[in-house]
Amino acid sequence: MGREVAESCIDGVIIEMVSAYCKRFYATKPELAARRIEAIGYQVGHQLIERYTVERPRFSDHLEAIKFICKDFWSELFKKQIDNLKTNHRGTFVLQDNRFRWLTRVSIDPSLDINEASLESSAVTPENKAAEATSMHLYFPCGIIRGALSNLGIPCAVSADISNLPACSFVVRVKA
């Protein structure tokens, strides 16, 4: 029997990590918080893929490695496979998860430093604040994907798109 951690523990750690980096460590510099959260995810992905591929032969091409991420790696992390994989066959892959587990429990505090004066004076709306807070939670899984692929010898950039929560798309662009 393998070692497993309760999902609620992982959820709590991720939520607290994002909160700590966004509200305490880098409260005035969200781009630094995002970079640090992504770097932590990169280390996690780099180490996890090492564990999950230790007895597998190296992958022959990018598509084979991405398919492994979508099926086996995602199943180990989230107990389900990626729902959809699209590619343009030129180094861009879109991994679609229609119910991304880490976004199903994210809630936004309605008192997030938004008052009527700030709403009138700038473009900060509750929806923008909610989207920004949710996007901060996606830097960690983007880092996990980038770290895993990097360890497989595929340098890439990973970004996330949330258009309809809790669905999420991860865009992987392989560097030439």
Image: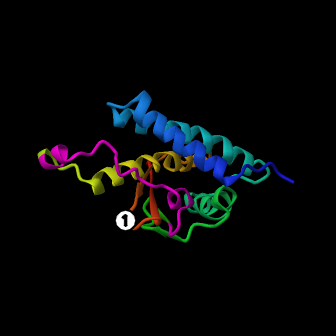
List the single residue furthest toward the right. Answer: 1
Q: Position of residue 105 (x, y in %)?
A: 53, 58
Q: Which residue is mark 1?
A: 163
Q: Amino acid at mark 1?
A: Ser
Q: Residue farthest to the top?
A: 25
In the picture shown, does residue 70 fall above or below 136?
A: below
Q: Residue at x 18, y 44 (%)?
A: 118
Q: Residue 3, position in %: x, y?
A: 80, 48
Where residue 9 appears, as percent x and y from the top left, is: 66, 47
Residue 38 appears in the figure: no
SS label for mark 1: loop
Q: Please state which of residues 118 and 157 is positioned toward the viewer in this rendering.
A: 118
Q: Residue 96: image x %, image y %?
A: 49, 66
Please check the rendered image and state whether residue 2 is part of the magenta-colored stretch, yes or no.
no
Residue 114 position (above or below residue 83): above
Front-most of residues 57 and 54: 54
Closest to the observer: 121 or 68? Answer: 121
Q: Is residue 119 magenta?
A: yes
Q: Colour scheme used in the picture?
A: rainbow
Residue 161 location, quadrant: bottom left
Instruction: Indicate left or right for 126 with 143 as reference.
Output: left
Say how many tags the image has: 1
Magenta residue span: 97-120
Residue at 60% of width from left, 63% of height from top?
A: 70
Q: Quadrant of the N terminus?
A: bottom right
Q: Would you say residue 103 is visible in this rendering?
A: yes
State left or right for residue 119 relative to residue 55: left
Residue placed furthest toward the left: 121
Quick one: label 1, few (<14), some, or many (20+) residues within 10 Å?
few
